[in-house]
Amino acid sequence: MTMTAMPTASKRRHLIALGALGLAGCSATGALNVLVPRGTYRAETGIAYGDDARQRLDVYVPLQPQPAAPLAVFFYGGSWTRGDRADYRFVGEALASAGIIAVVADYRLSPQVRWDAILQDCSDAVRWGFRNAERLGSSTRRIYLVGHSAGAYNAAMLALDDRWLARHGLQPRQLAGWVGMAGPYNFLPIVDPDSRRAFDWPDTPLDSQPIAHASAQAPRTLLLAAREDQVVNPQRNSVQLAQRLRGAGVDVELEVLEGVNHVTIIGALATPLRGLAPVRDAVTRFILS
């Protein structure tokens, strides 16, 4: 008779968190919050950047920030139809514990609004970041955008298509850089029903695609993708966008990661799942360098 060793407490937490993410998808990311530290940051929550109830953001400031610490505005995924900033405290903690001021923003969702209004909200949140950077201990020269899945699309469009930041007298080249995790950047024709509604398919304009805006004006870029992503094809999206940006002379880092999927690539930022893949190391190194 053989005996099976009981997993350690840390391994059990890892398996519980991984199981929750795998069973429930992106909405389960909030389950990770109970497993991450609270003593690594101070938070300012529920800050309005617009009049709508969805136009709110939370800020996570390192307890001992360095002078002019970088500031990262994070947009979550959810097919542009769901998501809540409260579920992403683990992202705020992952960045703040590395010395990065994190802004986690809600935005209006489909079917209330369509893709262009979503991007307007995201640009409004970035404007808030520029206006408050120095108050928070950062600098307008060290502002980054970070996004996962649909949120990576939002970040990409603000970083590549100058229409959105221009609403506030800003330009993509004023960003210090942007990070996209498992993002859809080249996804026509649209198959997913939620995304079809958000983008008015089949009347979706070609210029809704981030890859159409790849140019030499783009800021420094980090693209992370999961090799086994069954939701967003990494080759068509991350790899092709990286190729297009490099061809334009943009400084691009691309990592296609093993050990994670479309959901767990963002979960790997959290303490319990960091062993899955070096997602936090890649993101924080890029922002802090």
Image (cartoon, grey):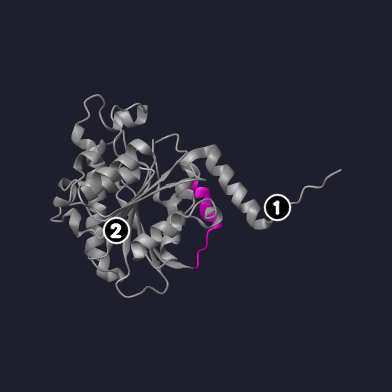
Residue 30 vs residue 113: left or right? right
Number of residue marks: 2
Judge whether residue 257 can be spotted in this image.
yes
Tell me the number on the disc at residue 193. none
Judge whether residue 158 can be spotted in this image.
no
The amino acid at mark 2 is: Tyr
Among all residues in the image, which is located at the extreme top?
A: 202
Per the rendered image, the range of residues in magenta is 29-39
The amino acid at mark 1 is: Pro
Residue behind mark 2: 144
Q: Secondary structure at mark 1?
A: loop
Distance CA(mark 2)–CA(mark 1): 39 Å
| Pick the front one: 92 or 156 | 156
Residue behind mark 1: 7
Let me know if residue 27 is in the magenta part. no
Residue 47, percent from left and from top: 32, 58
| Pick the front one: 116 or 264 | 264
Quarter of the image for residue 191 reads top left
> Relative to residue 102, is residue 1 depicted above or below?
above
